[in-house]
Amino acid sequence: MTNEFFLSLLIPFICLPILVYHKEIANITGLIDYPDHRKTHNKPIPKIGGIFFLSCSTIFILIQSSNFNERLIFSFLILTFGFFFIGLVDDKIKIKASARLLLQFIVITLSINIDFNLNIENLSVGLLDANIKIYQGSILFSIFCIISLTNAINLLDGKDGLAVSVFLIYLIIIYLTNPGPISIFYPILIISSILFLIYNIRGKLFLGNSGAYLIGGIISFITIQNYNNSNYPIEIIFLMFYLYGLDMLRVYLERLFRGKHPFTAENNHLHHYIYSFSKNKFVNLVIYILLLYIPITIHYFYKNYYILLILTSLIYLGSLFFFKKFEKK
């Protein structure tokens, strides 16, 4: 390992003052989450997670620029800065969902056109043992995947520590099993996530939309880069993200059937139900993480995708039924 890499490991600690002086930074930037009828906290909380993760990511890219091609660097920077600023504006003035989607569409399109390795051109389907070419629709499909995953991550950011814990464990799994072309980035993100969790899990700091969109964009970037590099079955991606992916789909469809806008803010996600199970939020967090990562863990010992897809569906539906029924009690 190079001296540059070991220097990079210090980046999260160099950015640590952002977390230590979170109140001062929040007061200067106005990034404060105030309580309302939907929120469980009863006092204003700084939401500067995006500033911390963006700082760590940007400094790392600048230090390690010689290890990546220019297209990958510019694509990553456009995606992360673009998503960060979309979330930042939303944190400040609450822009409409349609405007957010349009801005995300523009940012992703620019990123893909700079580095085409961010474009999904074929689907390796394990169930069919076949590669399916997408052809002309590949860019639109890639944009849809990134927007869906990013917004699914954003929806998780309603409970202390949840989104960042999901991000942290995702990074660890990817680092250990399928590192991909930007693996030297993972230790910095892992250390950054641990440092942020120390504050976030105790309700001292929030990610904010700027942070949630940012880590959603990073997860999307890593996943697609790894997929295009290794071309593993798409079922693995589903197993990694099934719990909040299916939940986002369910919630949006339910709202449409009730005549509501799919982006209406409500507390009817699976993680809301799970977090009403115990008064101890750490117990609820562990339950969610276990439910999320049990299928992908089983996959490394048992690779029957038919059974695994059925299992994920049963886990999601069973969890939804149990915890929703428990909440009503």
Image: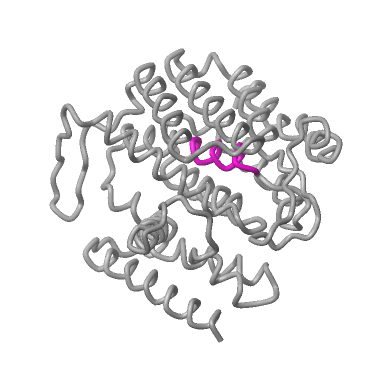
Residue placed most toward the observer, 219 or 194? 219
Measuring 69% from the left and 32% from the top, which residue is drawn there? 51
Asked whether residue 212 is drawn in magenta, I would say yes
Q: Can you say which quadrant of the picture contains the C terminus?
A: bottom right
Q: Residue at x 41, y 42 (%)?
A: 178
In percent of width and height, residue 224 lies at: 37, 35
Is the N terminus in the top left, top right, bottom left or bottom right quadrant? top right
The residue under the point 76% across, 58% down is 202
Above or below, 2 relative to 92:
above
Lateral position of residue 329 relative to residue 139, left or right: right
Q: Nearer the viewer, residue 282 or 278?
A: 278
Residue 25: name its quadrant. Answer: top right
Q: List the single residue furthest toward the bottom.
A: 329
Residue 86 horizontal/vertical position (percent): 55, 31
Left or right of residue 16: residue 160: left
Tell me which corner region of the image, top left, top right, bottom left or bottom right, holds residue 48.
top right
Q: Please state the horizontal and vertical placement of residue 194, each as a whole percent of the image.
A: 68, 47
Residues in magenta, as a range = 208-218
